[in-house]
Image: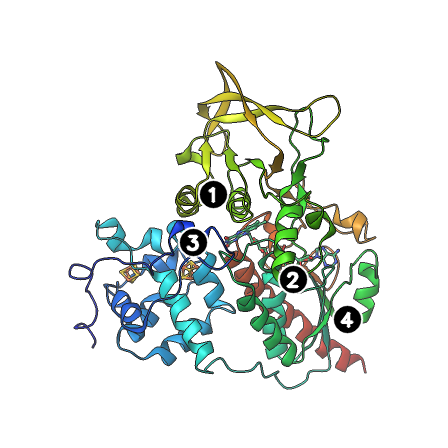
Amino acid sequence: MATEVMLQFVDTAQAYPAKRAAELRAEDFHEIAHRYALPDGEEQAGRCSQCGVPYCSVHCPLQNHIPDWLRLTAEGRLREAYEISNATSTMPEICGRICPQDRLCEGNCVIEAAGHGAVTIGAVEKFITDTAWDNGWVEPLVPGRARGQSVGIIGAGPAGLSAAEYMRLLGYEVHVYDRHDRAGGLLTYGIPGFKLEKPVVMRRIERLAAGGIVFHQDFEVGRDASLDELRRRHDAVLIATGVYKPRAIDVAGTDRTGVVAALDYLTASNRKGFGDSVPDYDDGRLDAAGKNVVVIGGGDTAMDCVRTAIRQGAASVKCLYRRDRANMPGSQREVANAEEEGVEFVWLAAPASLDGSGEGAVDTVRATRMRLGAADSSGRRAPERDPGGDFTLAADLVIKALGFDPEDLPVLFGATGLGITRWGTVRTDVKTMMTNLDGVFAAGDIVRGASLVVWAIRDARDVSERMHAWLKVKAASGRQAA
Ligand code: FAD
Ligand code: SF4
Ligand code: SF4
């Protein structure tokens, strides 16, 4: 037993990999911290107390075997650590980088609760999987014995990609359809490089393509094929299209030049990172350089926008959020990173109008002070207007980052029979994960609403099991009928 390398949380202080200086990282789109050097990663893993009931794993959506791979890491058995971490996740190095660990595994680590600071689980996960890639331990995707059945997956985000991997391993022919020119969904075009460098995503996609998964990029279901056509082409179909309808701000002036949607802004920035020509960026419309930027919202998307604007060389960047710091949905770590980089948060404030001269471009945000009232049905204290007064902020670029709702899929897909919930998400049976259309399954944000990458991967794991069970019955009944 390895007790002598474990339980080191009293003698070894918690240490995340060092972040680059804020002034330096604000100048590029590289990740802000590199991974551990070898002895540091092993030493940090050795802080784990090997709990009998590991709350870290309980609160990891993938139920990763965290204490096991921490122990193997501390013992220097990195390849085995990687194999165990890889067994429950299709993208451990991506989760290690972008999961909000403070709300998931690390936030529930017992030594955090004991006041010693959590084991740095995410950073260790990134360390072991990046080491595996460097050393060639990441095996190619080898498809299972061909079953003679095919699956069509709509959406190449983490849910679609993970399901594609699981179904290919089981021996299905897998086709992934995505309306973007590159696969990856929000991993590619939403989340900025300073949180997740793009080669990390691209190498995963290349591995899937090399394993025989067929990608149909620039293929929009609803435009290039209807859902029914895909149902005829494949034995089963998975809808994993994410949620993309931006929530509106109900104030005057949102149609002014200089008021833009968060995802348009982030996508343009990510495309520039790939070296693409992006007319709306190249003409300055989606470029924050030299501008006073106001981002409206307090979630992950807003955090990514403010930090992107800093890197583009904005003159000032302010984030306007109607609740306070403690009640914001975005990760506290991201707020701290943003503050270090020069973002100013204006808490308890909501826009009242987006003003400019005549019908011209926006130049000012008029804002209202807010205060927190009684808790609403979700238990969060609802913001209400504080008669304390209005104020104004200079703004040449206003970015709306209030979150996303599902698009109208039945209309978009030409499938009016597809069942949806009152929130517009696709309705699935809790046990089978199938929609009301035979052989059509759904997973990821389009079922949950805007969520997290790690939940998309978990849903993909679950839905793959259900699709496989359903397809086996279909194949057996086909044989009987023959
Ligand atoms: P998506 O990643 O949205 O992928 C859906 C795919 O479907 C897209 O590629 C889209 O092009 C395609 N598609 C849609 N409609 C069609 C159609 N009609 N035909 C063909 N293809 C279609 N989560 C975290 O865990 N950590 C973070 O730090 C984090 N940061 C985020 C930052 C931003 C800016 C945003 C917007 C989200 C962030 N999230 C984060 C959330 C996370 O990205 C999502 O929960 C996750 O990507 C959902 O995965 P998905 O596969 O369901 O959908
Ligand atoms: Fe933590 Fe996310 Fe990794 Fe689970 S997948 S161990 S929640 S970082
Ligand atoms: Fe280790 Fe913390 Fe998980 Fe316990 S909760 S097994 S100490 S990482």
Marks 1,4: beta carbons within 8 A = no
- The residue under the point 71% across, 58% down is 277
Instruction: Name which of mark 3 and mark 4 comes first in the sequence.
Output: 3
Could you tell me the amino acid type at mark 3? Leu
3 vs 4, front mark = 3
Badge 2 element: loop
How far apart marks 1 and 2 lie (CA) works out to 29 Å
1 vs 4, front mark = 1
Please indicate whether residue 74 sits to the left or right of residue 396 in the image: left
Q: Which mark is residue 234?
A: 4
In the image, residue 217 lies at what x, y percent? 74, 66
Q: Quadrant of residue 128?
A: bottom left
Within-10-Å neighbours for mark 2: few <14, some 14–19, many 20+: few
Could you tell me the amino acid type at mark 2? Gly
How far apart marks 3 and 2 lie (CA) works out to 21 Å
Instruction: Name which of mark 1 and mark 2 comes first in the sequence.
Output: 2
How far apart marks 1 and 4 lie (CA) works out to 39 Å
Q: Which mark is residue 275?
A: 2
- The residue under the point 34% across, 71% down is 69
Mark 3 CB lies closer than 8 A to ligand 1:
no
Q: Which residue is mark 1?
A: 330
Instruction: Name which of mark 4 and mark 2 comes first in the sequence.
Output: 4
Q: Which mark is residue 24?
A: 3
Q: Nearer the viewer, residue 348 or 139?
A: 348
Could you tell me the amino acid type at mark 4? His
Mark 1 CB lies closer than 8 A to ligand 1:
no
Q: Nearer the viewer, residue 319 or 96?
A: 319
